[in-house]
């Protein structure tokens, strides 16, 4: 089962990379020549596109390599940054770890981590954190 999950994660990462890099390849190959031919679009748009591409690749790489954090009894104060709105986030106890559940946090069963900002967390990068 663990091998199946690993392969599934790898396939999903491959599809993501294929879509992102494929999209940028189309932009660079098909759109950039049109920018050079146009009198209405300044050439600096190409430089901006390269910068955006670099930022996308860099942010994805950082997401793959930086740990999301782990809420424990010892670290809860460090991650307690968001207020409870009593609509989506209500103050309660995490049933798994028996600690206060912070807004935007969630226990990830795959990693065993209580992730502080789960809305900015992708479990597909898990194998890099151990």
Image (cartoon, grey):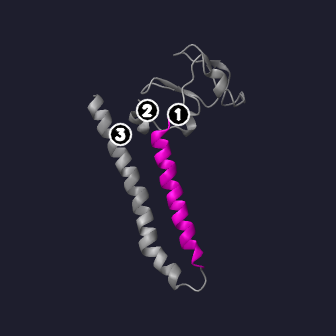
Q: Earlier in the sequence, mark 3 or mark 2?
A: 3
Q: Are marks 1 and 2 in contact (CB under 8 Å)?
A: yes
Label the magenta part by its dominant secondary structure: helix
Mark 1 vs mark 3, foreground winner is 1
51 left or right, relative to 81: left
Question: Which of the labelled discs sits on residue 102, or is there none?
Answer: none
Residue 91 in picture, x, y percent from top left: 68, 21
The magenta segment: 42-68
Location of the N terminus (image quadrant): top left
Task: Residue at 43%, 32% (x, y): give it.
Answer: 129
**According to the image, label 1 marks what residue?**
68
34, above or below 70, in the image? below
| 50 part of magenta stretch | yes
Mark 2 nearby-residue class (10 Å; few <14, some 14–19, many ≥20):
few
Task: Residue at 42%, 27% (x, y): give it.
Answer: 110
82 left or right, relative to 62: right
């Amino acid at each position: 089962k663990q091998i199946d999950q690993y392969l599934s994660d790898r396939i999903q990462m491959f599809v993501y990379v294929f879509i992102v890099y494929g999209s940028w390849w189309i932009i660079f190959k098909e759109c950039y020549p049109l920018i050079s031919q146009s009198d209405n679009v300044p050439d600096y748009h190409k430089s901006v596109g390269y910068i955006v591409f670099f930022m996308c690749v860099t942010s994805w790489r950082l997401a793959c390599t930086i740990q999301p954090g782990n809420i424990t009894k010892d670290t809860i104060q460090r991650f307690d940054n968001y207020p409870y709105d009593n609509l989506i986030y209500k103050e309660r106890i995490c049933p798994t770890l028996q600690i206060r559940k912070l807004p935007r946090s969630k226990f990830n069963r795959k990693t065993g981590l209580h992730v502080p900002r789960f809305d900015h967390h992708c479990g597909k990068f898990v194998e890099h954190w151990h």
